Amino acid sequence: MASLVRSWIPLLILQSFLVAVAFGSKEAEQFSEALLLKPLPDRKVLAHFHFENRAPPSNSHGRHHHLFPKAISQLVQKFRVKEMELSFTQGRWNHEHWGGFDPLSSMNAKPVGVELWAVFDVPQSQVDTSWKNLTHALSGLFCASINFLESSTSYAAPTWGFGTNSDKLRYGSLPREAVCTENLTPWLKLLPCRDKDGISALMNRPSVYRGFYHSQRLHLSTVESGQEGLGSGIVLEQTLTVVLQPETTSVETNMQPSWSLSSLFGRKVVGSCVLAKSSNVYLQLEGRLGHESKNVDTEIEAHKLWKNADFDLSLKPDRVLRESSGLLFIFDIDKSSDSEPFDLGLNWKLPSKWSCQQAPLQASRFLMGSGNERGAIAILLKATESQEKLPGRELTDGRCTIKANIFQIFPWYIKVYYHTLQIFVDQQQKTDSEVLKKINVSPSTDKVSSGMLEMMLELPCEVKSAAISIEYDKGFLHIDEYPPDANQGFDIPSALISFPSHHASLDFQEELSKSPLLSSFKEKSLVRSYTEVLLVPLTTPDFSMPYNVITITCTIFALYFGSLLNVLRRRIGEEERFLKSQGKKTGGVKQLLLRLTAKIRGRPIEAPSSESPAAESSFLSTKLIFKIILIAGAAAAWQYFSTDK
Amino acid sequence: MATEKRDKEEEEVKTDDGSLKIKPRPIVQLGIFLVAHSPVFSVVFSAAGVLALLILPLLAKNTYISENALMPGSARSMLSNRDVSDGSKLVKDIKNYRLNHEGQVQKLIGKYMSEMGAEVYYQKFHPEGNQFHPLHFFSGPDSYTLLDNVSCASYGVNVAGIIRAPRGDGKESIVLVTPYDFINGGDYEALSLGITGTLFSLLARVTWLSKDIIWLVADSRYGDYRPVAAWLTEYHSPSFKDSDLLKCGELNTADKFRRAGTMAAALVLKVDGRSERFEDTLSIYAEASNGQMPNLDLINVVNYLAVHRQGFYVKVEKVVSLLSSSWLKIIGEIFEAVGKLAHTLNPDWNFGIPTADYLEGSATLASSLYSQALGIPTGPHGAFRDYQVDAITLKVSPRFPPDSKTRQHDFFLRGAKLLEGTIRSVNNLLEKFHQSFFLYLLTSPSKFISVGVYMIAFALLVASLPMVAASLYIDGCKALNNSTLNPAGNFKSWKWLDAAKQVFALHLFGLIVTLLPYFICQVPGQHSPSNRSIMWGTTSSSLLLITFATIPGCSPFSSRRHGTNWAVLKSVTISAAFIGLCLMSIINFATAEIGALLLVPTCLIVQPIKPALRSRRIKSLLGAFCSMVLLTIGFPVMLFAISKGLFGEGLVGLSLGGEFWTWLESLWAWKSATYLYIGMVHLPCWLLCLCILFHPS
């Protein structure tokens, strides 16, 4: 396989060269790959793969792309997508240990399952249509049931609570979507080197899916060229974030485990993807480690940074960057080859401890109440330890405040009573006007649309905890609206808590080359965190008993209508008189015989015929007896065969 | 053959010929027939009902795992010696800590949990128990209303640790509860912490978890139930308001409470006492409040793993005194003989079981019925049922003394393996428990009777009531027509009105008597239970006298002119009893079953005693005697004393009233519908029967 790939590489290089010659004057398509590794305080390692693919603005429609995946560009052109993000996530992001206030976590900590949002560049009336078409297209592209987001009960149009202010934004999430390798393969197909070469070759499926957290993300945005006649360029950003547990042999529990790329992924990097403009590996060390030495002017000091008493790296970093909270080692993998594969290792020598920067408030959400009738959803915001150190406090009317946006979608069967919204700050109930700065509610419509709640809280800076609770009634679904595993319960998608006045970014002391990963980290990104998915048990019918239901309903109907008709139709006095007059005419014996025969034949009583009734009845009796014998025979046969073993 | 049949028909026709009546429809005919022969049928039906109850142990089916996803025992246990040594170390640490320190063992357990990698928190709760409030009877678990002035003198501290499933989505959780008295807990109790500690050590590092695991060490200083209930209320309906309780003690628990999604199942583990048998014994307790049971699958899984994998001797509660009762033995022998006979006739008929099995089954069944009927949960698992969580209590009794080190290792290993297997099964579940039965009675840990079977006994018992009521009503009407010539006689269908008034008045009285304890509890000052019961008794009886005095015709001692016909009264009484029993059977079937066993014969047999004494015929005297006996037994206090004697707790003398009060107090504190049944169905019907007995006719 490798030889095959290698034989292709010269061809590809040649091609890209030709392309470069042909479009020499214009900006060419660019692809870059990067891998960020980061030891986490709870003895795990985060690996963040970052691939960026840029297609410059061009005027030729339907033009052939060289590096950029055609499927995506077609998608953008067809549905006029301005910005879109799709993420597949498995596992929960641990805000406490893995951080919540750095660009990495605010961008890559995603809710469980599938999350999709998109901004369209179409007239307002066509947004929903575009969204529906887009979900179907993505569903096919990524082998996932994203098409379930098509139904208007599953998506919402946030106005400001999501962070992006646009009225052409649609947001939906599928918490129950299972994420696996079938979703990763189409995602990898979008990369020019797939997972054959370069950094993406590290993505060994068993090791990737063995992790504690796994989130693959695809973010695309269009860049307007600004020039007349030119189309728009597309930036496609693909990231895969995994949190892995390095295997450790040491018994000491406070010692950080040592690891290397090969021990984490079971593979090594053998050269970069030749199509990539840059391919780097970064190692980020957080906490006190960064503050040890102030100046790295001399070679010895620089050497100390990566080989010291605490830890040593197996490779010499090409550059070392310092940012406010730690160190960033940069490795270029171009130099690696088959004989000398790139296998970065980190060896800890001393136990070390540090903590991640956390978001100002930590959010958790849970259900309250019991029973199948009603309940309440509560969102609890707790102040984290690092809250006081954070920038982004605002002074309004002389008070220091923290702003928090809460964005929540409610499925229609969770019938929320918005007037029951209660807010508690530090165990004191507050009126809405005290803490609620903005609120936007769009109630749900049964079986038509989901409800949405956006609110902006303004909490005092010294807040210890805040709780929001809102009551709801559980709805009843029609029997064919239940999913196959209805008894599991129904999911309420994650709520999004964002802090509009807090922005996370890494600022490096020295200016650096245009690495896409680093520049995305340098951009100020909104601090946001998703809460847990909730499971609401709804009343479910016993699906295994439709037969019983049908029979009992039919019986009741038959009894009801039978007796009702009897009451309405029969006139007992009349019948009696009629019978009496009949009895006078014919003898009692004959009359009763007639009735008997009529009953047997299932016909109303006839006028006495000339035929001898006795003969007829005897004939009928033989028939009857024949029937009885037949049935008895059948029963006996059945009994015989059923007991026979 | 044909002619023969025809002849027969002709014969029938001839007999009917003379009168020439129009035959009513068959169903009506059947009804008339039943009503006409109601004495015979009522005896037959009641006897059949009792018989159906007695043969229930024969009809018990073997349990089976209904939900395929459970797959108990299919995975190999991953427990290692390291886990067991972790657990043993915890037990040893606790023992040492308690010897040397005065203080909170909770912190030690919390430290152990966090070392394992769990999220730990402490929860303070107030031992304030349930309070009776008449309006809150059927309402769900009420929200945690904290008292304003909480004293810090008495409060408990629970410890809970949560292991997050590594790749799970955090929507569901499994709860493990070990009640432990941090102050007076014995060595045996500490073993339960050892088992769970062992298991926790394993679960903290496994990768197969899909649901989070919560380990709650409940502070059982104030009973097993209360801490678990307090924790569950905090979990499901926390109060966001400030509470004084949080400020008590040095432990700061504010805002530390953590949750882990919807609970899928809960297991309560207790270790107590030494096993009397050679094997380690595992007792399963499943009854929650008002006879609610967890899904049978949960019991099945535990039973399967305990018996077939870990070699525990599994048992469920049984009425021990029944095991030695001779009459039940005779019945068992009869059934065995019948079964053998049937087997010789047809080898496929295998319903006979040995007498010993029958005795065991009946004793277990009786206990199962009794616990369900009482409506009081048999352990801390009852608190979970209020939140629709399936839960059982496992009580393990080791066969060794608690300080035996060598045996302890093996015991921890097997106990933890049992729990591991159960958790693994529940972990496999995609949906919550719904496949198997919720309505069942157990006759042994591996045998059950489903609702379809045990309903028959009750249905047969109560079936005779409407029949007898109808026939009595017809008789009463006839008697009224013959005897009196009052103008009301013209309103033919209103004859039951007088009787209904009386029945209604007595039911109202029953309601008031039911609510009285609430007001008696409000009486200021400390009163002993005996005093309270005396208060209750006197107020009730004076109320009864007032009722008799004010409503004419109510009293059995009133003059004959006012009195209603006893047959009509009995008919309405029986109808009321029938309605009451049927309603109760929906709420708590076991209560209705036991209630029917008592009420149905009493209602059927009771007759005015005066004519019987006057007639001096043996038959009527016997009837009067029987009704006297049944009425004596039927008096609730008497019933309580008899049930105490039956369960081997020893008859009590003068303090009976006090004990009865305590018993009733526990019933209403647990919101048991049985209390309502006794007050609003049993007591009025019993009084009405008394009225009939002393009816001056």
Image (cartoon, coloured by chain):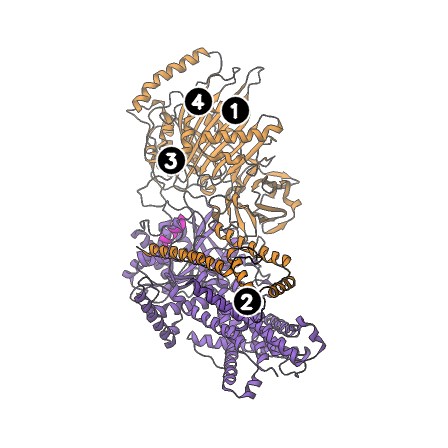
- Looking at the rendered image, the disc whose residue lies closer to the viewer, 2 or 1, is 2
**Chain coloured orange in the rendered structure:** A
Q: Where is residue B397 in the image (x, y as percent from the top left)?
A: 35, 64
Q: Where is residue A70 in the image (x, y as percent from the top left)?
A: 46, 22
- Looking at the rendered image, the disc whose residue lies closer to the viewer, 4 or 1, is 1
Q: How crowded is mark 1: few (under 14 residues within 10 Å), some or many (20 or more)?
A: many
Residue bearing mark 1: A76
Judging from the image, what secondary structure is the residue with disc 4 in? strand
Distance in Å between CA atoms under marks 1 and 3: 29 Å
Left or right: A71, with A210 as reference point: right
Q: What range of the chain is rendered magenta?
A: B415-439
Q: Residues within 10 Å of mark 4 (few under 14, many from 20)?
A: many
- Looking at the rendered image, the disc whose residue lies closer to the viewer, 4 or 2, is 2
In the image, what residue type sits under mark 3? Val
Tell which subunit mark 2 falls on: B
The numbered mark at residue A31 is 4
Residue bearing mark 3: A208
Q: Where is residue B533 in the image (x, y as percent from the top left)?
A: 56, 76
- Who's the residue at 50% across and 31% down the image? A136
- For marks 1 and 3 on the same chain, the one whose residue lies earlier in the sequence: 1
In the image, what residue type sits under mark 2? Gln
In the image, what residue type sits under mark 4? Phe
Q: Where is residue B688 in the image (x, y as percent from the top left)?
A: 59, 76
Identify the colour of chain B in the image: purple
Distance in Å between CA atoms under marks 4 and 2: 92 Å
Distance in Å between CA atoms under marks 3 and 2: 78 Å
Where A86 sits versus B442, above or below?
A: above
In the image, what residue type sits under mark 1? Val
Distance in Å between CA atoms under marks 4 and 1: 18 Å
Tell which subunit mark 4 falls on: A
* Front residue of A191 and B304: B304
